[in-house]
Image (tube, coloured by chain):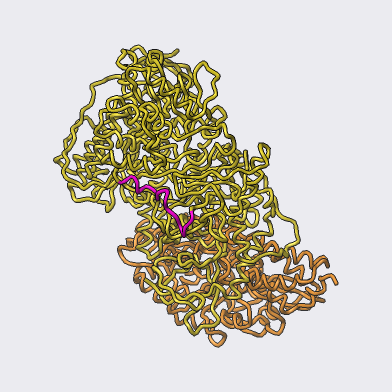
Amino acid sequence: MSTSNVNLGLTNVGPETHPLTWRYTQAGKAVTEIAEYEALEGYSALRKVFTSQQPADVQAEVKNANLRGRGGAGFPAGIKWSLIPMGPDAGQKYLVCNADEMEPGTFKDRFLMESLPHQLVEAMIVTAYAIGATKAYIFLRGEYLLAAERLNAAIAQAKTAGYLGDNILGSGFDLDLVVHTGAGRYICGEETALINSLEGRRANPRTKPPFPQLAGAWGRPTIVNNVETLCNVPPIMLRGADWFKGLSQGKSPDAGTKMYGISGKAKITGLWELPIGTSCRELLYTHGGGMADGLELMCWLPGGASTDFLMPEHLDLPMDYDTIMKAGSRMGTALIMVVDNQQNIVSVVRNLEQFFARESCGWCTPCRDGLPWTVKILQSIEAGEGEAGDIETLQQLTRFLGIGKTFCAHAPGAMEPLQSALKFFPGEFEKGIQA
Amino acid sequence: MATIHVDGKTFDVEGSQNLLEACLNLGLDIPYFCWHPALGSVGACRQCAVKQFADENDTRGRLVMSCMTPAMDKTFIAIEDAEAKAFRKSVVEWLMTNHPHDCPVCAEGGHCHLQDMTVMTGHNTRRYRFNKRTHINQDLGPFVNHEMNRCIACYRCVRYYGDYAGGTDLGVYGAHDNVYFGRPADGDLESEFSGNLTEVCPTGVFTDKTHAEHYTRKWDMQFAPSVCQNCAVGCNTSPGERYGEIRRMENRYSGSVNHYFLCDRGRFGYGFANRKDRPTTPLLAGSEQVFTIDSALDAAAELLGSCARVLGVGSPRASLEANFALAQLVGAGNMCSGLGAQEQALNRQVLEILQLGLAHNPSLREIEDADAVLVLGEDLTQTAPRVALALRQAAKNRGLQMAAEKRVPDWNAAAVKNIAQNEKSPIFITSLAATRLDDVAAQSLRASVEQQARIGFAVAHAIDTSAPAVTGLNAEEQAAVTQIAQALLAADKPLVVSGTGLLASSLLDAAANIALALKNQGKAVGLSLALREVNSLGAAMLAAGTADLSLEEALNALINGAADGLVVLENDLYGRAPKALVDSALAAAKHIIVVDHQATATAGHATLLLPAASFAEGDGTVVNMEGRAQRYFQVYEPNYYNAGNLQKEGWRWLHALAATRNNTPVAWLNLDQVTAAVAQSCELLAAVEAAAPNAMTRIHGSKVAREPRRYSGRTSMRANISVHEPRQPQDADTAMAFSMEGVSGPTNSSALIPFAWAPGWNSPSAWNKFQVEIGGHLRAGDSGVRLLDPAFDAATYRTLNLSSASGLVLAPIYHLYGSDEQSARSEVVASRVPASYISLSTADAQAANVVDGQNIELHSGGFTWSAPLLINASQAAGLVGLPVLPTSPVVNYGATVTVKGA
């Protein structure tokens, strides 16, 4: 996938309608220099906030905007922020940007960081101000070398411009922003594992409670937000919560736009910034041009490998958090993966489970030992060497590796494609069982 | 308090615990792996799942991990829920996908927590049919075996070794189902507490290598409640015996002393009891005569009868009863403590300070509660290691407090660790050189013995200006003094720790002054003073008020003819007085009777050597540094395996000898009678009989079985000698039986617990079944009785008297392996004893123009010693460090010395 396929075919791309991508589309290229960015309304949200607003105002505006977390879980960012202790006794706090984008089929944060690095830097400065964090980290996927280079350059430029460092714009607020590149573990996308990794510990998730807002990085109050979530903060501060909610008017109760994307054998794969609640049919057939010639859609994953398969009959559902949840899956990152009718669904699932088994941190038993077993059974079925009872064992695994039974959401996420494949395509699995 | 509902029954629980602890406390079994009473909860293994319901009307519920769920009021759970049971069974099934099922050849088998949990969950058929992952094992040194293929990745080992014990060389590597617990490379585990891995590990990854050398299943060993003989802490142990040999030393839980953990000297230093060169029959010098007990006593009485004055040399490693019997034998004025004058005076001083009652002498559990600590001069990790481990826990109190402020409970171990980060309760350490406890210290001050005493006195003065002031501190030391005083004053439970290790009365005086100063400021202060040996304090208490001689006095009396007979009890004089002096005295003595279980150099000079029982073959009472009298019980009867074995407790030999010599009846037929006599004749030991239940104690009419229920092969044990199985030895001394018949497992009525076992619980996890509350005290009371809790009357500050010595001073350096005579006689410990050396600071080495590794000579008076130089960059200037090792000479520490290249 090339990141140049962004907003392909969209017209009238502007700040009022495409707050995350309009600069890129209008410039026709990545906006990496601070002067270019400033010429396109860059740092105007920051200037507005720092000259006229208190942290509580920013928190209130974002809460009012109903900005839900774009990393996949959809937790409202404003509510997350409201849990962090404020006031003079709150002590050291941290803001961490979760930029460890490793969800299979997902590449939206990569685009945002490579093409619009200043947008994230501005967003983090405003957010850090809102929560009173004087130290902020971008925990970046190690393979995102270009993003690292451009973010570091953007940070240096922002420092020179006085947007970062001590006493930003005379506000008395100090912020140090650092890019920390990860060493390549999927689990680092889990916010508490990310914090452990940031501290130099093994990337095992932490138990919650206590939540990071109370005891996060180095035991201090910490907010972790996804790249896309943060990038929505400056436009909200510039144009207001009501404008943000209006972006998805008539499509979804969720607010704003969403970076949607397609991977798999569609005619066009890429990224589009669309109002949240856009249907998969519009995404796949209007923007993606439908399936590649000669192929039919068998099923699709709505937002990464750790979501349940949906079927062609689900294409008209609005892609928002609650609707997809009700349909039995999760919106996740909203970058869909399409599976065509020439694929063997057992192989597809086996491939996904191999990924999850490999990426298990090894902390809790069901995940560490249950996922490799799952893989081995699937390999056996794939090879036509499945045994009686294997499907029942897989079904039991999907239940016992579910939410609440494992330490974190890794194994439950891994079970989502498996349990939905077993539900929608039981015959494909039964074919692999020896008589 | 909280009311919880479990499987439809209602229980009142304490309320601050998690559900797993609460249920275990109630006697309800929930299987678990990653949780450990001393390590808290981390929620990794998912084995302790139960079904939790929102309220009494909720029938659906959801699975929760009981270890991670608070036992709050109105909690409704079901352990017996079908889904919960199926899930728990699945957890074991997952663990078994990679476990090798090699129980028949695994050393853990029979006391394996994994076996117990597998049975408890009902997992009995494995559906997994694929290959297992395998690992390469490591050589972790002479103590601990490594078999990673058995690992179930519960993470207990790294949590214990790193988080609890402060070790840095055991870690977890890799990810997913390929996690590996081991060292960066093969090599000896560095921690002084590595042996606890064998009990912390719920399966056979870490096992006791010394046990493997002569392996016996747990159920085939005979056990007795015992007390570690290798330092003055008095950890409770459970030695296991088969065929007249100690096969393994396991921790015996004590809620007051050692809890779940021993040090490696204690766990692996039992081999002295198994030495093949031990005396087992009476030996008359220059004779081949075969003795019976009676003929040996007659011979001994005759020898003593031919002497004009017989001196008795007692021992701090012998029981109260044996020392007392010796004093009775030789009579007033003829008893010697067996200690050099310097150590004897220090032990007396410790006792004198403890008797003032100006501070509480804490148990290890109480040491763990301290929130500010000053360690004055004692290298605890090497001299009283289990105290050092307790101090590591004390350092965590600040973190627990920080967690509590965020409403995170103590048991939520990972969260507490995250919140605490590097914050610690303040611990200050003064020492000659870097110590292995410095990593938890807020500040470590390295200074000469005298300077450490000055610092101590200055701290007392900074706390209470009426304590004497001192001069001679530099600005850095003065700043530290202020900081230490402030920290101790700010603490709720301040603690001062020192000891006799540096052989300096000024340090003990300084510690007493600090305790008094804190007391005068209204603080409830703890004072813990380490001594050298298992019964150092007991021997000092026994001798209190008597005119016992120092070893030098006794030896000189022999040399100058004031005495001509000598009875030595379990003591190697060559380890306590200069060789020349001992040689002359032994040569001058007319007859020497040695009662010992070790073939020491002194025993080699005996006219008559009487074979004493070791801790494994006899009973006795010892007093630890806490002032706690504890009983060790005979593990086995050597005579059962070989009728020629005549080892008897020291007190039995000495009392019988006195009866023979005086032609009086034998008054003490069993241990209780001797202990009663001790209690009667010695005021400080008046309560000593309460150290253990007496021999008449019965539980439900029965004695307590030393052997597990499944003890096998007894009828064939002696079949090579005779097919007739003899009657089991009878134990008149205690309420224990040399049998599998009798009481086994948890009871409410007795502290006589030979080994950890309860129905369904074969591993050390069974201790849960003996406790009032999980990790707390034993239901029947922790073993032993505290003897020194005097009420405070009055005390005055001590003044600092320092010699005006200048130049280099000789200072003792302690080693966990080697500085204790007895454990160093164990082969495996001997392999870890360092080679002899002389240490200097970098500057002193430069001044003396000597280089690292070079052979150097030290001179003091007429004394000369030579060894390779070890330059210790952390060592304070002005010191010549000489390690306390079996190969080192007995020297006058504190003396001025000169060094030069050899």
Taking the spot 40% from the left edge, 55% from the top edge, the residue there is: B420
Position of residue A311 relative to residue A141, above or below, is below
Position of residue B226 relative to residue B2, above or below, is above
Magenta residues (range): B687-702
Q: Can you give x and y, in whole percent of width and height, for residue A342 in the image?
A: 81, 73
User: Dividing the picture into quarters, in which one does residue B668 lie?
Assistant: top left
Tally of numbered tags: 0
Position of residue A336 relative to residue B655, above or below, is below
Residue toward you, A4 or A208 = A208
User: Dividing the picture into quarters, in which one does residue B121 lie?
Assistant: bottom right
Q: In which quarter of the image is the N terminus of chain B?
A: bottom left
Going by the picture, which residue comes out furthest to the left? B466
Q: Can you give x and y, in whole percent of width and height, for residue A251 in the image?
A: 57, 85
Relative to residue B448, is residue B145 drawn left or right? right
Residue toward you, A426 or B328 = B328
Position of residue B291 relative to residue A216, above or below, is above
Q: Quadrant of the C terminus of chain B?
A: top left
Task: Name the chief secondary structure element in magenta.
Answer: loop
Taking the spot 72% from the left edge, 55% from the top edge, the residue there is: B132
Query: Can residue B899 be seen in this snapshot?
Result: no
Letter of the orange chain: A
Query: Can residue B518 be seen in this snapshot?
Result: yes
Relative to residue B194, is residue B882 drawn left or right? left
Letter of the yellow chain: B
Q: Can you give x and y, in whole percent of width and height, for residue B865 in the image?
A: 42, 16
